[in-house]
Image (cartoon, helix red, strand yellow):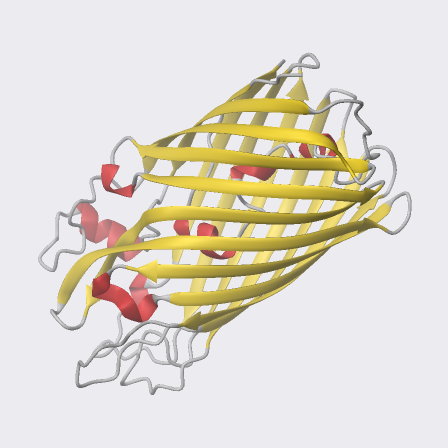
Amino acid sequence: MTMLILTWSFASTAAEFKSVETDQSVREVHAKREAEKNSESSPDAKSPQSRLLFEARLETTYNSNVFYFSRDEMDSFDTGSNSTGKFTDIDSIDDVILSPRFSVTFKDLFLGHTFMSGIVVTPHFYTQNEVKNYEDYQFNIRQYLSKGEFLEFDYEKTPEFMEGNFYDRDDTLYKKATYSEDRFTLAYNRPLSEDISIKAQYFYLMDDYNNNFNEYDMDSQALRLTIRKAFNEDLTGRLFGEYKYEDAQGDLGDTGRIESEPSREIWKINLRGIYDLTSQLQTYLQYGIWFIDYTTSHSVVDDSYHAQRNDVLQTIDWQAAYSVTKDVELNILYQYTIKDANPETDDLSILDASILGYEMQQVSVGMKYSF
């Protein structure tokens, strides 16, 4: 069996989500129906023969704030202020991103249950800020143990991603900050009853920044527990809690002073409700909140942007998907994100708190065709 899927949609690719968030990615845009197709809670399909499944998607993304600028930074950009190099190579605040996605999945029986393995390649092309172009590569293995119960391993590689222009205290100007990321995920999913299932996940990430910002190199670990509950045939809820620790591992070098130390703890709660209005029309509403605490022992004078700082990030998503036929689906998505930063001091002589928070909006319309 061969499957080809073409998707046109608008979705967010914000780097901060990329680092500490997985459920906001475009892979979950189709929510409940995608989960059912991937057999997270459906019967273990015992196919009599192996299959290769091919998939191609094209996503067109509009993001209102691709560099996570605060309102003050947006004003500075609009007035053309670039004396420190903060906006070098940045052509616009918002952007449209083209993201073709290609995947191949092998599916067969192993040990009497379904086995799946796949490779996904996703380049991202920014129409205004070409310096942000990057690629994602993903490898996945899933082995079912019984109906709805599976083990999963996932590896994802981003060779180079530009996060923005960061301030280099060595040269007292802004420079391009890029990093490569390796992400490893282990997952176990198990149904507890006909209408409740749980999923446990362990994440390990390695972020390697370019030489200008070695102090931002990170080794991160996270644990997530997700509970899914079907209240009836039409309404499903999902709740997860996550704890993550990002541990700065960078070589601080011989600078003769204390470098920034961005280690932090993150607690996250996410709630989603998915409702089938009709057999063809489905909608969901999702809310997520992160509590981010920086853990450096440095003083406010030595590391004013991290010492004793705590942030709160919130997201709201709404989506509706309409199945025109069994092969054609239309969808619309809106997402709003706001980050509030709470540094220890508001002393303008050592810290500009106006650059720490941001808002971002996303509007998505799309079509999926499969055969």
Q: How many marks?
A: 0
Whole-percent x, y for residue 359 in the image: 41, 51
Residue located at (13% from left, 64% from top): 173
In the picture, the quarter occupied by the C terminus is: top right
Residue located at (53% from left, 37% from top): 26
- Is 267 placed left or right of 71 in the picture? right
Residue located at (17% from left, 60% from top): 174
Whole-percent x, y for residue 287 in the image: 62, 50
In the picture, the quarter occupied by the N terminus is: top right
**Viewer-closest of 62 and 176:** 176
Residue farthest to the left, as pictured: 83
**Viewer-closest of 71 and 337:** 337
| Snapshot quadrant of residue 16 | bottom left
**Relative to 77, does residue 261 appear above or below in the rendering?**
below
| Snapshot quadrant of residue 202 | bottom right
| Snapshot quadrant of residue 92 | top left
Residue 16 visible in rendering? no
Residue farthest to the right, as pictured: 193
**Relative to 182, does residue 171 appear above or below in the rendering?**
below
- Is 17 placed left or right of 128 in the picture? right
- Is 52 placed left or right of 249 in the picture? right
- Is 193 placed left or right of 185 in the picture? right
Residue 125 visible in rendering? yes
Whole-percent x, y for residue 252 in the image: 26, 76
Residue located at (12% from left, 52% from top): 81
**Relative to 102, does residue 79 appear above or below in the rendering?**
below
